[in-house]
Amino acid sequence: MEQVDPPRADSSRASRALEDGELLRRVRDRREEALAELYDRYASLLLALAHRVLGEAGEAEEVLQEAFLQVWNQAARYDPSRSSVSTWLILITRSRAIDRLRTRRVEERTTSAAER
């Protein structure tokens, strides 16, 4: 009887990456179900990242929406030679969260200066 090796985690990750890449190509083609699938896969991770940066759940949810809107509008800009889809999504979310944090700090300084 021939022994079959169990699936390796590396091959599973490679398969998932191919699936993610295909989903992103479908998002580029304006297929809403592909965006929904990416959302289902990554929303909890990205929401946790945004919450960690911002410290506030409501703002983190807004950042998540902004990130997926950016994915929808800029899917054609994704370059698979530069990063995986998951890394690209993380970078977009992190950038949106940091932008939000900077805006918040400017608003706080402005309010503080106005009160003096």
Image (spheres, rainbow, N blue to C red):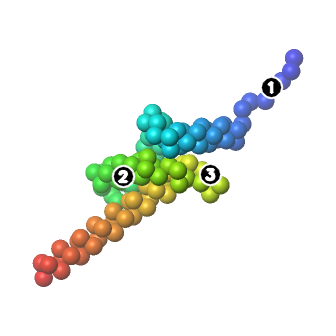
User: Badge 2: few (under 14), some or many (20 or more) residues near its Cα, within 10 Å?
Assistant: some
Check disc 1 and report the residue beneath it. Answer: 4
Question: Which residue sits at x=13%, y=82%?
Answer: 116
> Who comes first in sequence, dot 1 or dot 3?
1
> Who comes first in sequence, dot 2 or dot 1?
1
Q: CA distance from mark 3 to mark 2?
A: 22 Å
Residue 43: image location, x then y, percent? 43, 43
Residue 93 higher or lower than 23, as above or below:
below
Check disc 3 and report the residue beneath it. Answer: 80
Q: Residue furthest front?
A: 29
Q: CA distance from mark 2 to mark 1?
A: 45 Å
Q: Secondary structure at mark 1?
A: loop
Q: Residue furthest bottom?
A: 116
Q: Quadrant of the N terminus?
A: top right
Residue 104: image location, x then y, percent? 28, 67
Question: Which residue sits at x=62%, y=42%?
Answer: 17
Residue 54: image location, x then y, percent? 34, 59
Nearer the camera: disc 2 or disc 1: 2
Check disc 2 and report the residue beneath it. Answer: 66
For the residue marked with disc 1, what is the amino acid?
Val
Q: Secondary structure at mark 2?
A: helix
Residue 3 higher or lower than 97, as above or below:
above
Residue 85: image location, x then y, percent? 56, 48
Of the pair 26 and 97, the residue shown nearer to us = 26
Please give left or right for residue 63 compared with residue 71 in the image.
left
For the residue marked with disc 3, what is the amino acid?
Pro
